[in-house]
Amino acid sequence: MKSPIYVYYHLSNFFQNHRRYVKSRSEKQLRSRAGENLVSKCEPEASTLDGDPIVPCGLIAWSLFNDTYKISVGSKSLEVAKTNIAWPSDKKKFGSDVYPKNFQSGTLIGGGQLNTSIPLSEQEDLMIWMRTAALPTFRKLYGRIDVDLEANEMVTVVIQNNYNTYSFGGEKKLILSTTSSVGGKNDFLGVAYLAVGGLSLFLAVGFILLYVFKPRTLGDPTYLSWNKNNEAHWD
């Protein structure tokens, strides 16, 4: 496998597309320190028992994925880069003056912790997680390996199983993948293009046959309702 090699975590039966879950965040709080107290949309993870705001607030951040992977080839550990893995557009949504505060300090711990000394604009794991998935089965980027893996090499992965998927009957998988000039391997786009192309071809043939066997002159005023009524009247 040629570098860069992308490391993904895969979750199933996790409904990030649930309406309440998707809305449970504060865009203004994420973007600027001035919006720290704007947590009205984040219940039940809006504030502590003392009334102090949670930063970042909401169910999405609260459920942050927190399994960790240590990957090695033989006796050599591979570094999994965690920088430059989020979308540039997502980075703009997180402020450089916003730091985690009171995060995962409630009575029920959801997922991973955040480093309180690092601004949200540099916490790319959080950015990736907070781009909610459209389907209950999805994969998200964990990191990047910047060295090649040769054929027949033995890759060892040590997984720290922190994330609780048993409570909702989900499954977790680890995926190593590369990309080409047209992106990664994904059957969905190919199937979608074939389906849309086939439907377009079917409709095109149908319209051609309709035009051949039942032609109609475009813009012919005799088809107007009042002209038809006049013809019937004169008859």
Image: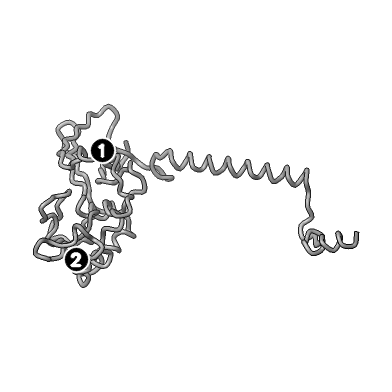
Relative to 194, is 1 on the left or the right?
left
Residue type marked 1: Gly
Between 123 and 15, the one lying in front of the other is: 15
Q: Secondary structure at mark 2?
A: loop
Task: Give me the residue at 43% from left, 40% from top.
Answer: 188
* Outermost residue to the left: 50
Residue type marked 2: Val
Report whether residue 57 is seen.
yes
Q: Position of residue 20 (x, y in %)?
A: 29, 55
- Position of residue 233 relative to residue 6, above or below, is below
Of the two numbered discs 2 and 1 in the rendering, the one whose residue sits closer to the viewer = 1
Between 212 and 125, the one lying in front of the other is: 212
Q: Which mark is residue 64?
A: none
Q: Position of residue 168 (x, y in %)?
A: 24, 40
Q: How far is mark 2 from mark 1, CA to CA?
A: 32 Å
Which residue in the structure is indicated by mark 2? Answer: 98
Where on the picture, by quarter, is residue 122?
bottom left
Which residue in the structure is indicated by mark 1? Answer: 170
Where on the picture, by quarter, is residue 4?
top left
